[in-house]
Image: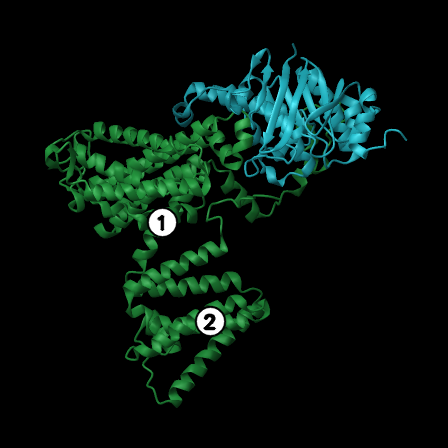
Chain colours: A green, B cyan
Amino acid sequence: MADEDAPDTGTRSIGKDQWVEQAAERIDNRPVAKLRRRLVQTPVQWRVLGIGALALLFALVSPTDYTTRVAFTVALYTLLATGLNVVVGWSGLLDLGYVAFFGFGAYAYALLSSEKFGLHWPTLVSVPVVVLGTALLGFLLGLPSRRLSGDYLAIVTLFFGQIFVSIVNNGDRLQLSLNGHNVPNKPFNLTGGPNGVTGIDPLSLFGNKVHTITGYYVVTVIVAVVVMLLLYRLRNARSGLALRAMREDSLAAEILSIPVPRLRLLAFAIGAGIAALAGTLFASVQLSVFGSNFDLPFLVLMYAAAILGGLGNIGGGFVGALIVAVLPEMLRTPSTGRALVYGALVVFVALRLRPWGRLAQYLIALIATGVLVRLGLAAFGTSIRPRATGLAGLTGALVPHLTKSVSFGNVAFLTLIAGGLGLTLLRPKWRPVAAGVVSFIGMLAWENRLAEQGSITRQLLVGAALVAIMASRPQGFFGIKRVEVL
Amino acid sequence: MGLLDLAEVSLGFGGLKVMQALDLTVNEGEIVAVIGPNGAGKTTLFNLITGVYKPDEGDICFDGTSIAGIDPNRRNDLGIARTFQNLRLFLNMTVKENVLATMYGRNTSGIVAGALGLPKARREEKAMHAHAEALLAFFGTRLQGYRWDQPAYSLSYANRRRLEIARALATRPRLLLLDEPAAGMNPTETHEITELIGRLRTELGLTVLIIEHDMHVVEGVSDRVVALDYGTKIAEGSFDHVATDPGVIEAYLGKGSATK
């Protein structure tokens, strides 16, 4: 910003700042930097709408119901992660009861619109009622804990999350014993206990019942986009600014006019409302709800999505949801799993091993290990069976494939873990060489053991991928690195 | 009766008496400096006025009404704002957002209006932005231009102190409490701050209560100086009067120093 842009400071002698005056000269004008700037300067609203439009297009080109269902999961998780973002990302409240609000929304919708009590409230009535009711519940939960923060709040909300599951699982025989009289006479079945609530009405919008997964996908994408746009507006409005200030320094915020306890309740209520909205979609697409849908692992998954995407960022929820929903599905079949594993390896090598000398060291170590392993196996008289065609053939030519020998795969897997840990302890100088050796052992373990055990490998690889992502980008994909003290 | 009146205010942490029957009056339009050695209770005084601590005894009145029992944010609504000695900016928000955030109490649009972007909220936000820009312009070019959109943690120490003042001003206070505004600044910047404090009164009509260790600043700005030690007032009056007071010299330099 040049001098003439600065407001006229008149005759005041103070406040001249050379660094600010020369800001324009420091701007990078190379084409890549320009393109990057233009992308960053595109209003967030347009970016959200663009991604939403692409997501809707996917509904048209989605090859099977299965892919649409995965896409629906992504959209639902996006909605949930976005709501969690308000509570954790903006307001800094560690809310471990978040999934209970999701569950409460799902159950409330299930009770209002299902065969259970014969109530068939129309969607456009029951959904707003459920959302507002759950927001009120969030508000009430916040009341006793409005002065708690950090770990203490986490304990209270975790308890709430657990008690919700307990109540739902035991809510099929509610009865009070008062002075020897049972009230009511027969145990009252509210939640269906472990059998859950079934026969839930599908969504019905403007006279059209939504029956297909594609329909639910479209509805969820639209809901998610609208929620994101509203939240982005709110983020920079009076209340959003105050919520974020509260996270940064609640004492300073409170002294400078921000009513912190009240805003905590507000953050809880907003998060609960969004979770409940997702809950109604979940219940209506599943046509049934069970207590086990809302347990602790699901909470962890939502936190993973929100943190991976980058806390505090509106688009982050989408990226995080994409990772936690799609990655496990892609690893379900061995062939896509193989493409993913080798692809990730190539990307990692291309990104991290620079300059060329280091890459050469890596490749030489990789090939040398391969030759040594093959020679060693040949010396022991073990037969080597290359795989047939394509990518599999290519890797088979390089990596010995011994499906019959399970113990060989186990040894390779254990060596891989030891090697991976050892890699972090080495001096940087030796890392390319060691990484080459470890990569080969990794391929060996993959081809001989992991690819055969799809269901277990899936979990392992998702875990490993999350560790790798968080280690290389702790603030998440779209997060901005937070600075606590300087 | 001044703008701010403290009457017999006492505060203890367990057995430790950090404030003992302090009387203090700050009149409208005055600039009063609070000095004293480390641990004298200067920042505690600010914490009592802003509501971080509630006094054990005594009363604090602002503009004639008692504020001793009300919450910090309500006190700000009445017109008391402060800066912090150890800098408590919203570090991961931008410079402009820091100033916008504390305008919360002076505006009214709620979450629904904010999320939907209703005309009322938009009008209010436009005024907030204009006000923030005007406040940041108060510091010359130091908090201008591209710095608006930079995170607060990227600012230099002196600029963070300036932003603290801008953020406090955003609440439209009548009484501004400045906790060591010149700490960590070089002589030129200290001079700037001295000038700036004068402008706070002449241009914005503020009453200022300031804690400062730099005696050039104290001499340059204050109408009146109050010296504290061990939570009690040991001297009060003009700078020259307080600077030569034997009790004050003793508090700073130890017993026997005053007689030499």
Q: Quadrant of residue A6?
A: top right
Q: Quadrant of the C terminus of chain B?
A: top right
Residue farthest along the left direction in this orientation: A186
> Would residue A346 appear left or right of B161 to someone viewing this image?
left
Mark 2 vs 1, N-terminal side: 1
Q: Quadrant of the N terminus of chain B?
A: top right
Taking the spot 40% from the left edge, 23% from the top edge, the residue there is: B113
The chain letter for the residue carrying disc 1 is A
* Amino acid type, residue under disc 2 in the picture: Gly
The chain letter for the residue carrying disc 2 is A
Q: How many residues crowd around disc 2 within 10 Å: few (fewer than 14), some, or many (20 or more)? A: some
Taking the spot 29% from the left edge, 32% from the top edge, the residue there is: A134
Q: Which residue is mark 2?
A: A419
> Would residue B251 appear left or right of A288 to someone viewing this image?
right
Q: Which residue is mark 1?
A: A300
Q: Is residue B239 above or below residue A33?
A: above
Residue B47 locus on image (x, y percent): 60, 27
Taking the spot 34% from the left edge, 66% from the top edge, the residue there is: A338
* Amino acid type, residue under disc 1 in the picture: Val
Distance CA(mark 2)–CA(mark 1): 29 Å
